[in-house]
Image (spheres, rainbow, N blue to C red):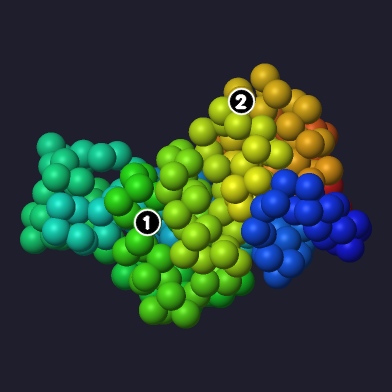
């Protein structure tokens, strides 16, 4: 099956002129072996594991998920921090400096993680992919540089709502698995720009169920977010990855289905 997906993607590359490498194509197709679980902002079932905290990442690693997703902002002075919202406790991360953002405290007493600290924890468990969401284009170059410095290019997958950010990561890391989030382009459209997967919301994919087959026909994989129930529906639809806040429940379901 992997060989078929790789062949299909190679054909698509010739037809579209896409500069996806064979290495990247093989890695993307390999995801389709079975449904994978991505922990949305880590695993955060209680306040001691706030979302996007290092504690939540560690918990996700302990569960043995395929990947743990997290969000990255760049501060005005070039600092890179992990948080979902642009603002935290009234501080605008993109407009503030590292000396301010670095003192922000999460509900469990952790300081807001720097991207370096988060990736260093992630690197300790290489079997768990680090699904790095760029919250804005400005965070792309610094994030790529740090991933390269730590030597974890193969462990990190990239997602973004910004199409330009996706293309920038592909430009800097041609072998990276990059997934587009916004849901306004077909799989064939994004593949033409070197983006080898779609990571669309449940609502978007319900509006365009044909995109799942189109992605697979192009050797791409499909991630759906954020699914906290109706897991069987998406498994039956043939998605390859499910991003969820209920990682443990989904893992247990998949084990029971074996």
The one of 159 and 122 positioned closer to us in this rendering: 159
Instruction: Left or right? Give the position of 48 relative to 86.
Output: right
Horizontal and vertical percent for residue 183?
57, 31
The one of 2 and 10 positioned closer to us in this rendering: 10
Identify residue for label 2.
Answer: 204
Instruction: Left or right? Give the position of 225 relative to 13.
Output: left
Mark 1 and mark 2 lie on one chain; the one further toward the N terminus is 1
Tell me if residue 243 can be seen.
no
The residue shown at (44%, 60%) is 57
Q: Do the residues labelled 1 and 2 touch (CB within 8 Å)?
A: no
Residue 56 image-quadrant placement: bottom left
Instruction: Left or right? Give the position of 36 relative to 111.
Output: right
Q: Which mark is residue 140?
A: 1
Q: SS for tag 2?
A: helix
Horizontal and vertical percent for residue 160?
46, 45
Tell me if residue 83 can be seen.
yes
Q: How many residues crowd mark 1 within 10 Å: few (<14), some (14–19), many (20+)?
A: many
Q: Is 132 rendered above or below residue 161?
A: below
Residue 20 image-quadrant placement: bottom right
Q: Is 96 rendered above or below residue 102?
A: above
Q: SS for tag 1?
A: helix
The one of 115 and 52 positioned closer to us in this rendering: 115
The residue shown at (8%, 61%) is 99
The residue shown at (49%, 60%) is 171
């Amino acid at each position: 099956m992997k060989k078929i997906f790789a062949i299909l993607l190679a054909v698509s590359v010739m037809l579209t002129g896409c500069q996806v490498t064979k290495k990247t194509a093989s890695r993307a197709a390999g995801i389709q072996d079975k449904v994978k679980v991505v922990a949305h902002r880590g695993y955060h079932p209680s306040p001691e594991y706030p979302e996007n905290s290092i504690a939540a990442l560690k918990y996700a690693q302990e569960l043995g998920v395929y990947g743990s997703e997290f969000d990255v902002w760049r501060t005005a002075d070039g600092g890179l921090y992990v948080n979902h919202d642009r603002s935290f406790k009234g501080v605008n991360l993109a407009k503030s400096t590292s000396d301010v953002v670095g003192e922000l405290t999460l509900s469990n007493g952790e300081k807001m993680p720097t991207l370096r600290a988060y990736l260093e924890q992630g690197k300790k468990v290489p079997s768990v992919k680090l699904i790095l969401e760029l919250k804005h284009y400005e965070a792309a170059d610094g994030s790529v540089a740090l991933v390269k410095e730590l030597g974890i290019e193969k462990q990190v997958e990239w997602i973004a709502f910004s199409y330009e950010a996706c293309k920038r990561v592909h430009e800097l890391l041609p072998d990276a698995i990059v997934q587009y989030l916004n849901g306004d382009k077909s799989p064939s459209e994004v593949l033409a720009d070197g983006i080898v997967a779609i990571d669309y919301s449940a609502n978007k994919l319900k509006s365009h169920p044909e995109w799942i087959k189109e992605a697979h026909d192009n050797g791409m994989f499909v991630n759906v977010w954020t699914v906290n129930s109706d897991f069987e529906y998406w498994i039956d639809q043939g998605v390859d990855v499910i991003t969820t806040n209920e990682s443990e429940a989904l893992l247990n379901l998949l084990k029971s289905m074996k």
